[in-house]
Image: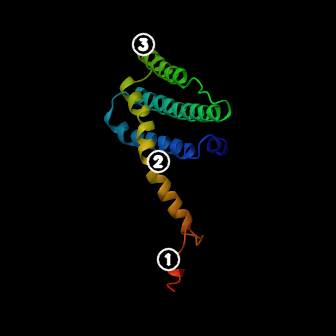
Amino acid sequence: MIMLKRINPALPQLIVGILFYGIVIQLTGMWFVKDKQAYTLGLWIGVALAIGMAINMAIVILDAVDGMATTGRTVRTGFWSVLRYVVVVGVFVAAWYFELANPLIMFLGLMGLKVSAYLQPIFSKIISHRGNEGGEPSVGPDKSSVNSD
């Protein structure tokens, strides 16, 4: 997780959010499907793709920022974006063609990236708020100790 935090400070929380989403979808959806194996495999392939996409996007953004800072040129962010989606479509087609997993549930697992990205700021605030409950000083002035002179 430390290595992921070096790439992007929000990346570990994003990945934990994707995994949490996968667990919630697994536990809730398992009761409503006939083919539990295709459901489970599809969901976790989608979750794995979401995690892979998150890591790839963070690395591409880091490389683009570093490239602009050092050389003033951008890296091939468009190439990596297209390649990322080609891989996702390829995995979906392979899973559908070989009937390994449910593609609709794979898509649901892949949407964990979006759900986690939208909820990450909320989780970050909750985590930082819990970190300050231990009596550590918070950032900024404490209003109770400000003199009114």
x then y, percent, for residue 8: 59, 42
- In which quadrant is the N terminus drawn? top right
Q: Earlier in the sequence, mark 2 or mark 1?
A: 2
In the rendering, at what x and y percent does residue 72 appear? 63, 30
Query: Disc 2 and disc 3: Cα gap in Å?
Result: 34 Å
Instruction: Tell me whether the residue at label 1 lies in contact with that at label 3, contact meaning CB atoms closer than 8 angstroms.
Output: no
Q: Residues within 10 Å of mark 1 (few under 14, many from 20)?
A: few
Q: Residue furthest bottom?
A: 149
Q: From what the image shows, is residue 80 above or below residue 48?
A: above
Q: Residue at x 49, y 84 (%)?
A: 148
Examine the image and state in which quarter residue 55 appears: top right
- Amino acid type of disc 3? Tyr
Dot 2 falls on a residue whose secondary structure is helix
**Amino acid type, residue under disc 1 in the picture:** Lys
Q: Which residue corresponds to the image point at 55% horizontal and 46% vertical from the top-left?
A: 10
Mark 3 highlights which residue?
A: 97
- Camera-nearest label, 2 or 3: 2
Residue 39 is labelled as none
Q: Is residue 4 left or right of residue 54?
A: right
Q: Can you identify the residue that label 2 sits on?
A: 120
Residue type (three-letter) at the residue carrying disc 2: Gln
Which residue has dot 1 on it? 143
Q: Tell me if label 2 and label 3 are in contact, CB under 8 Å.
A: no
Residue 71, percent across and down? 67, 29
- Specify whether 46 is left or right of 29: right
